[in-house]
Image (cartoon, grey):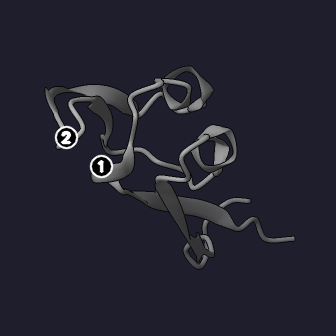
Amino acid sequence: MSTVKSKGTVTIAVETCKGCELCIPACPPAVLTMSSTVNHLGYHYPELADGCTGCAACLLICPDFVFEVFREARSPAAGAAT
């Protein structure tokens, strides 16, 4: 049996974010933080650090639909223990 590990990333539409911060505690790997700068609406927006798994928790909780989630399925290296 082989295990497929998932790696992900998100794009964030920072100009439509209203800074509610619901995505921050919803992110299981804790890779979202609020920016120190503001968008054209005057709101702080989330920024992504390395470590996103593509779980889509941010996408599901965001009331403004600012996230787009991308996942890359990767098979383990040949000969690696599973």
Say left or right for 78 vs 9. right
Q: Residue at x 56, y 32 (%)?
A: 27
Query: To which residue does mark 1 refer?
Result: 14
Q: Quadrant of the N terminus?
A: bottom right
Whether 44 is drawn above or below 79: the answer is above
In the displayed orientation, state which residue is furthest to the left. 37
The amino acid pointed to by label 2 is Asn
Whether 73 is drawn above or below 60: the answer is below
Binning the other alpha carbons within 10 Å of mark 2 as few (below 14), some (14 to 19) or many (20 upward) gives some
Query: Quadrant location of residue 12?
Result: bottom left
Q: Quadrant of the C terminus?
A: bottom right
Secondary structure, mark 1, is helix
Binning the other alpha carbons within 10 Å of mark 1 as few (below 14), some (14 to 19) or many (20 upward) gives many
Q: Position of residue 55 (x, y in %)?
A: 65, 50
Query: To which residue does mark 2 refer?
Result: 39
How far is mark 1 from mark 2, CA to CA?
Answer: 7 Å
Say left or right for 51 vs 58. left
Front residue of 57/37: it is 37
The circle on residue 33 is none
Q: Position of residue 61 (x, y in %)?
A: 66, 38
Front residue of 63/71: it is 63
Q: Residue at x 68, y 60 (%)?
A: 81
Q: Residue at x 17, y 32 (%)?
A: 38
Badge 1 or badge 2: first in the primary sequence: 1
Q: How many marks?
A: 2
Q: Residue at x 54, y 62 (%)?
A: 69
Secondary structure, mark 2, is loop
Are dots 1 and 2 in contact, CB under 8 Å?
Answer: yes
